[in-house]
Image (cartoon, rainbow, N blue to C red):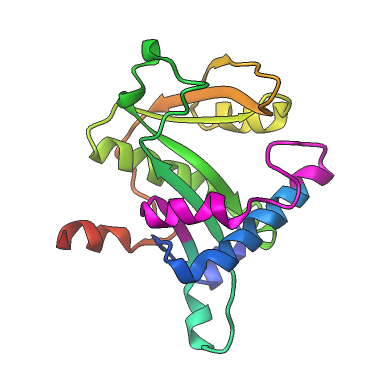
Amino acid sequence: MHTNTLLHPLALRRAEPADLPGVITLLADTAEWLYAQGVRQWPRGGFGPERIEPLIEERVLFLLDDELRYLDPDESAPPVATIALDDHADPEFWTSGDNPGAALYIHKLAVARPWSGSGLGDALLDWAGASAHASGLPCLRLDCAKGNPRLQRYYRNRGFRHVRTVDLPHRSSGALFERPSEDMLTTAFRDLTIAELISA
């Protein structure tokens, strides 16, 4: 695992409205990096606030923070990573035959470039799978770019099965993947959402 994760304790929490600029910056940086790789998964320049604010309001957007940033209150460090996890099956991709309610769905998974290769993407996928399992759902699902074999290979190597590719001319995404939910322990970060669930 990347030394960043050893030197910097990380914590996962739900995004708050004040996090919007940092999330937009992280997603824009990731989109620009993808664009430089020739991948058109996301719009160049990332997503506008109208796409991210609803995820924050619905409490389905999660951020991974470097906890050392809190030692310097003047520094507004962007999140290390972000992931949205919800039960919203995209109706253009997932049909009634897929039993859309049987899964949680991953969106907006991004890891900041300085943390690339740290294993945080894997850890967030495992956390999402454990969340689906805890919700009594058998599957974890996502969609990704039709024209990105490297990303599709990444998901296959992490236990996801390619369900099918939906080729819609107005969508760059459409490669559908799922894997069984599983109760997996993640040690890469502290999960602050557990306390939320206990107190709910």
Front residue of 34/155: it is 34
For the point 49% across and 87% down, the residue is 71
Tell me if 192 is positioned left or right of 26 in this view.
left
Residue 79 in view in this figure: no
Vertical position of residue 85 compared to residue 197: above or below = above
Tell me if 6 is positioned left or right of 183 in this view.
right
Q: Position of residue 142 (x, y in %)?
A: 50, 31
Residue 77 in view in this figure: yes
**Farthest-out residue, top:** 97
Tell me if 35 is positioned left or right of 200 in this view.
right
Q: Is residue 118 magenta?
A: no
Q: Is residue 56 magenta?
A: yes
Vertical position of residue 68 compared to residue 86: above or below = below
Magenta-tinted stretch: 34-63
The image quarter containing residue 156 is top right
**Farthest-out residue, left:** 199
For the point 32% across and 34% down, the residue is 182
Front residue of 45/110: it is 45
Front residue of 6/58: it is 58
Q: Position of residue 19 (x, y in %)?
A: 50, 68
For the point 52% across and 21% down, the residue is 92
Q: Position of residue 83 (x, y in %)?
A: 49, 49
The image quarter containing residue 200 is bottom left
Tell me if 67 is positioned left or right of 132 in this view.
right
